[in-house]
Image (spheres, rainbow, N blue to C red):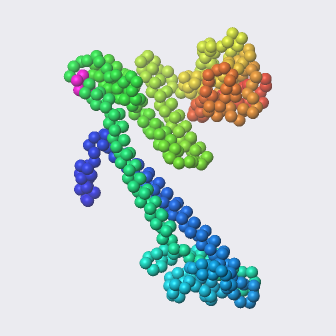
Amino acid sequence: MRSVRHRPVLRALAPRTLRGRLSLVALTTAALLITALTVVFNTVVERHLRHQADDELRARATAVATTVDTSGPRVRVLETANDQLLDTNVWIYAGKRLLEKPPATAAGSPPTRTAGRLAARGAPDCATVHAEGQRSVRLCARPVSGGDATATVVTALDLSPYQSSADTLLVGSLILDAFMLVCAYVLTRLAVGRALRPVRTMTDQATQWSAVASETRFSTGGGPVELARLGTSLDALLDRIRAVLRHERQLTGELSHELRTPLTRIIAELDWWRSRPRSAAETRATHEVIDEAAQSMRTICDTLLRDARDTAADTSTAPGTAGVVPVLRRMAQRLDTPVRVKAVVAAEGGHHEAGVAPAFLERVVSPLLANAVRHARSTVTVSVRHTPGAVVIDITDDGPGVPEAFVGELFQPGRRADPGDGHHGAGLGLPLARRLARSAGGEVTYDAGHAPGARFTVTLPAG
């Protein structure tokens, strides 16, 4: 009941404008990020200062250890010229027996008790204790051996200067954080206000056009993609009122609705991946999620566009099946081949039907066929055969083949065997063909043992 009562209060405090809400979200996100960075930074600084203090204590303990003689049956403390300087904040123990302590330190004080505990352990160790006036004192023990007797040197250091440095850094970082948050909020409001200015203009135009049957349309040329989409949606709304582009409006709405989820997944994965350095396994996992979302978007676009085309043409093409040989022959006829190259389609047996749509089959085979024509000397052969539950398509050319050193990178996006071969490809065709085939339960492979030339094999489920 309490949360229900608080909802109206929270709703009243929330900004009413999109500009205010976006600014609040940006401010909250920046505050969380800056807080995390501040905590990490000050933690690292504190540990670094503590390591510095420990290093100084160990150096002092090593210097004092040179004045302790353990060669005989008893521990002796040698007198030196700097004896008073070395004895400052230093305890020397023979076993558990205290030989020397700082003159100004009482026997039962917290530092002395802590020094005794460290000496009793007989091993190098450090500890922090709160002395008089809530001062933090750091103590480190160093065993001294070398003869029949054993001794332990314990040195102490006041951490107040280090704590003061850490506090100064903390205050400075908090002031800097506050300044950054104010700048982020102001810049966000300015940027969002400027970005939403065209939206206000479009809103005023829509208000005017709603009163009359105007032929005017929203001008979004040269603007951001988001505003262009908004303008397209509003134009579709006007066209729906006039009952002219009902079909296009329906298609736009379906695409916008269906693509929202995979687009959100891609954006979220990229933001997560960019937030900090990632391992190879995490990067591979991100790639897999993005690849899956992209395949989902492709399937959605294909399905909706094919539906729209069939509806507009009043046809009833059976989805998910394709006569392989007619599709391949049609593709061969449309090829823009050099005069010296001839494309031949050959089929073993009777009718070959794949369990994918014709357009999908074309998109899988097209990059492989274009690649073969580009590298062939005289002939490109496309052969079709059946295996149990699958249709196999071999694309063979009589060109120079794939360099052996490049075979391992053949299906990696953006890789080309010879970037200076004169064509303007981006090295994406073969990886795209393989991803499409795998999305349908098939595969695209390269036969490294074939010679001369190159042979790629497409395997798709039988229809």
Identity of the residue drawn at 69% across and 78% down? 66
Identity of the residue drawn at 55% across and 43% down? 286
Identity of the residue drawn at 62% across and 33% down? 413
In the rendering, at what x and y percent does residue 89 appear? 56, 79
Q: Nearer the viewer, residue 271 or 342?
A: 271
In the rendering, at what x and y percent does residue 422 appear? 66, 20
Left or right relative to 46: residue 245: left
Q: Is residue 297 magenta?
A: no
Q: Is residue 121 visible?
A: no
Q: Quadrant of the C terminus?
A: top right
Identity of the residue drawn at 37% across and 29% down? 227
- Residue 433: quarter of image: top right
In the rendering, at what x and y percent does residue 376 appear? 72, 18
In the rendering, at what x and y percent does residue 419 appear? 67, 26
- Residue 201: quarter of image: top left
Left or right relative to 4: residue 380: right
Dominant SS in magenta: helix
Q: Nearer the viewer, residue 275 or 243?
A: 275
Q: Quadrant of the N terminus?
A: bottom left
User: Range of the magenta residues?
Assistant: 206-210
- Work out whether 308 lies above or below 45: above
Q: Is residue 209 magenta?
A: yes
- Work out whether 306 lies above or below 290: above
Direction left: furthest residue? 211
Left or right relative to 77: residue 210: left
Q: Nearer the viewer, residue 327 or 405?
A: 405
Q: Is residue 46 visible?
A: yes
Q: Nearer the viewer, residue 359 or 131?
A: 131
Left or right relative to 433: residue 297: left
- Work out whether 290 lies above or below 93: above
